[in-house]
């Protein structure tokens, strides 16, 4: 961490009131295993299997989204196992640890569906290091209403694209918290949040 980053962190940690660290899931908290998105564009001869990381680089729009099949992400067992068997991204978990130590709330904002499955899986799987350096389960530090999976089949999130849906969630949360820091591996998502020009919302690119 350079001096400028350190100054920014100190500035954020000194914020009074209720503050929220909002984290993406795939390739931010975990590199998921054995879960894919399937693409069959008119230009594809055969169905193409994409990892979440590869999918993040796709130019998905409201017009072409019907050419993507998210069947793995609608299977509760596959969704849960993709997290529990995945590779935790330690560098971003350390960021989470720092914010927890400074009494920030923790939220999840992911383009996945199966919101209830994701909440229950993360509550049991996700861990943090406390002020003594001991590993603890996230447990009650992860609150149900702060876990948002914007493509959940049982809920309707306003917006035509994932970027719009995530932006709308952030706008709503910005009215409830003194400061919000949003961490995501996709620069397009970060740019969408920046373009909201909300004074109490800050963005941070997830580490690899």
Image (tube, rainbow, N blue to C red):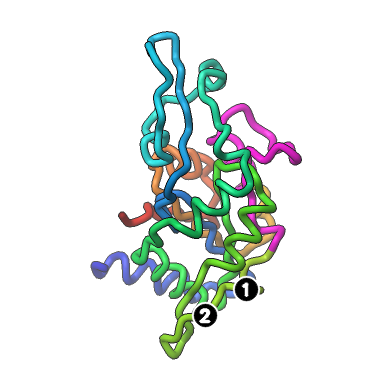
Say how many tags the image has.
Answer: 2
Give the vertical position of 1 relative to 33 (above or below): below
Q: Is residue 8 magenta?
A: no
Q: Residue 195's spot in the image, x, y percent?
A: 48, 39
- The dot on residue 11 is none
Regarding mark 2 in the picture, which secondary structure is present there? strand
Q: Is residue 174 visible?
A: no
| Residue for badge 1 | 139
Point 38% across, 58% down: residue: 87
Give the vertical position of 157 relative to 76 (above or below): above
| Residue for badge 2 | 136
Magenta residues (range): 144-170
Point 69% across, 53% down: residue: 116
Q: Residue 120's spot in the image, x, y percent?
A: 65, 61
Asked whether the beta carbons under mark 1 and mark 2 sit within 8 Å of each other, the answer is yes
The residue carrying pointer 2 sits among few (fewer than 14), some (14 to 19) or many (20 or more) residues within 10 Å by Cα, namely few
Instruction: Tell me which corner region of the image, top left, top right, bottom left or bottom right, holds residue 47.
Output: top left
Point 40% across, 33% down: residue: 50
Regarding mark 1 in the picture, which secondary structure is present there? helix
Inter-mark Cα distance, 1 to 2: 8 Å
Foreground of the two, 129 or 121: 121
């Amino acid at each position: 961490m350079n001096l400028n980053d350190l100054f920014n962190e100190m500035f954020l940690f000194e914020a009074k009131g209720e503050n929220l660290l909002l984290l993406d899931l795939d390739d931010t908290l975990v590199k998921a295993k054995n879960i894919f998105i399937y693409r069959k564009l008119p230009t594809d001869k055969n169905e193409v299997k994409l990892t979440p990381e590869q999918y993040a680089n796709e130019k998905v729009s409201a017009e072409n989204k019907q050419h993507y099949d998210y069947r793995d992400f609608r299977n509760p067992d596959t969704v849960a196992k993709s997290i529990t068997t995945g590779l935790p991204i330690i560098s971003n978990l350390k960021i989470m640890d720092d914010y927890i130590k400074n009494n920030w709330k923790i939220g999840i904002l992911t383009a996945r569906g199966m919101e209830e499955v994701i909440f229950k899986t993360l509550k049991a799987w996700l861990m943090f290091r406390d002020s003594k350096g001991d590993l603890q389960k996230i447990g009650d530090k992860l609150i149900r209403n702060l876990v948002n999976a914007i493509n959940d089949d049982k809920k309707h999130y306003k917006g035509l694209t994932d970027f719009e849906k995530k932006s709308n969630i952030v706008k709503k949360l910005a009215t409830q918290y003194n400061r919000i820091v949003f961490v995501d591996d996709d620069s397009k998502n970060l740019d969408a949040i920046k373009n909201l020009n909300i004074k109490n919302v800050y963005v941070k690119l997830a580490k690899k």
